[in-house]
Image: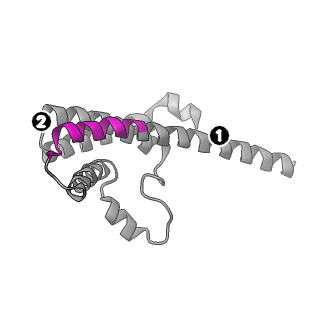
Amino acid sequence: MIKEFQRLKLDESARLNQSWNLQRTLAKVNYTIHTDAIKANLVPKFLTREQCMAIYASEADLLNMALFGMTAKEWRTQNRGIAGNMRDHASIEQLVILSNLESINAMFIHQGLTASQRLTQLNQIAITQMQSILNSPHLKKLK
């Protein structure tokens, strides 16, 4: 009976990890949409590679602030010794929302909203989506 329980726990763990990996992949795909919008609208042609990378990092941190409430650097400072980054340690729910925020932020960038305007709206969207996900009876059945 103990061996069967251990086998079931291993199966459950593998299933959850696959779901997490799918969401992480989805977030990476939407990140391409996000970076294309940054390139088309926020990165002037005459910047150095380092300056361009700073713009992309700033936009990634805008999403981090909207969803996680901190920048990547702040997370690393608070989580010294932990491998990976904050997105690697995000829940499935957070990764779903991150994926959504990347697409929405790309749209906001194309619309010409300022970083401050985008952060405010993205944070409200993240809060609303998290509440919806956590309160969804359909999603509770999946857990």
Question: Closer to the camera, 112 or 13?
Answer: 112
Disc 2 secondary structure class = loop
Q: Is residue 35 magenta?
A: yes
| Residue named by callout 2 | 112
Which quarter of the image is occupied by the C terminus?
top right
Question: Eyeballing the image, is 103 above or below 62?
Answer: above
| Between 49 and 64, the one nearer to me in the picture | 49
Check disc 1 and report its element: helix, strand or loop: helix
Give the residue at mark 1. Answer: 15
Q: Amino acid at mark 1?
A: Arg
Q: Residue at x 31, y 34 (%)?
A: 103
In this view of the protein, can residue 108 be seen by the observer?
yes
Disc 2 crowd, CA 10 A, few/some/many (<14, 14-19, 20+): few
Q: Residue 41's x, y, as percent?
A: 16, 38
Q: CA distance from mark 2 to mark 1?
A: 41 Å
Judge from the rendering whether residue 18 lies leftward or rightward of residue 49; answer left or right.
right
Please report the residue visible at 24 percent of the width from the left and 59 percent of the height from the top. 50
The magenta region covers 29-45
Where residue 37 appears, x then y in whole percent? Answer: 24, 36
Residue 57, quarter of the rendered image: bottom left
Residue 111 located within the stretch drawn in magenta: no
> What residue lies at 37% left-to-right and 70% top-to-bottom?
77
Q: Residue at x 14, y 45 (%)?
A: 44
Find residue 54 and report its image quarter. bottom left
